[in-house]
Image: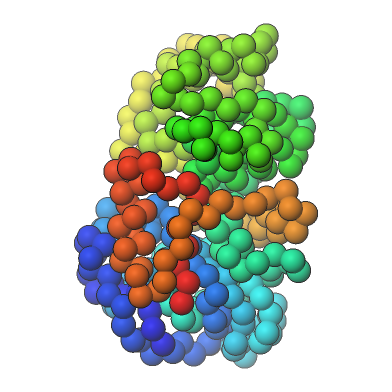
Amino acid sequence: MKAALLDSPGPASNIRYGDIADPTPKGNEIVVRVAAASLNPIDVYVRAGTIPVNLPKPFITGSDVAGSVVAAGPDAKRYKPGDRVWASNMGLQGRQGSCAELVCSSEEWFYPIPAGVTETDAAAAALVGITAHLGLLTRSGLKAGEIAFVNGGTGGVGSMVVQMAKAVGAKVIATVGSEEKAALCKSWGADLVMNYKTDDVVEGIKKFTAPRGLDVWFETQREPDFLKMIPLMAMRGRMIVMAGRTAQPAIPTGAFYVKDLTLHGFAMFNASFDEQRKCADDVNRWLAEKKLKPAIGRTFSLKDAAAAHQFLEENTLGGKGTLVGKVLVTP
């Protein structure tokens, strides 16, 4: 089969389009013919060697995938050939990735694609949907009537936070960097959208949430500013961090504890099969109900996977600002 292969970590140009043996399922593994894969910042970090991990050689890049089952191992019970499925967590912890014509992994990592949901939407919602759910609902327990804030309302995770908050009946405030992004965020139901380049975000949050403050702050940026965040929080508010591996921000502990605040940090790939499946069940339900609509920014062919990585890196690490939504790779 054809795949986007990496022989050693490094720049995007290290990815080559080539041949690798078709996988054969063992135990409870299934083989899926890929209709769409999507890239995430974690894929950039793994490819670049920023996160040192033991990679198969050659390594297939990519973590999210959607497609149809073509073969199942002797112990597989969840799926059979012809079933449409999606998955995240490919390309991690020794598993081969998703940017290939076929993927093979234990069936626990896969979830059924609901009727009426496309493979491209399923792939685009995979890692970011599970990540948003783990932070917004599993960790912070956002409830109907509460108010959540997310930095970057049209980013991969941020877009899911906005839509999930609305799906559970909460209000949501988001920041964006352009009028185009603001219009998209509002189309998902965001109650207040501010341009962080031109608007006074702190004053906007104060006015919208007065007199209580924010119930949930979902921080997607690598350098959280707790000196700014904590005064905006409601009593017993919850703050979520899921980025910034090297960040060492100052935390005013006095202002933090007198409000009974809680701070939750998490990494999606630490969650168990069962924890992730609970998130995926809600993602599937909301996709089917059209309450979640993943934003797809750009689609590359499999042979152009190196260019897809370069484009994503320029936007996630370089701040180029030319991406709205997810980057997809299709065979």
Would you say 84 lies left or right of 37 here? right
Q: Is residue 148 visible?
A: yes
Q: How many labels does the image show?
A: 0
Above or below residue 260? Residue 125 is: below
Above or below residue 252? Residue 61 is: below
Q: Quadrant of residue 303?
A: bottom left
Q: Quadrant of residue 197?
A: top left
Q: Can residue 136 be seen in this view?
A: no
Q: Which colour scheme is used?
A: rainbow
Residue at point 75%, 39% (across, down): 168
Q: Nearer the viewer, residue 75 or 115?
A: 115
Look at the image and tell me in which quarter the N terminus lies. Answer: bottom left
Q: Nearer the viewer, residue 105 or 321?
A: 321
Residue at point 37%, 31% (across, down): 223
Would you say 151 lies left or right of 1 here? right
Residue at point 31%, 63% (across, down): 307
Q: Residue 173: give x, y in percent of width and height.
A: 60, 27
Q: Residue 112: give x, y in percent of width and height.
A: 69, 70
Residue at point 60%, 53% (across, down): 294
Q: Residue 282: give x, y in percent of width and height.
A: 71, 53
Q: Residue 4: give x, y in percent of width and height.
A: 35, 74
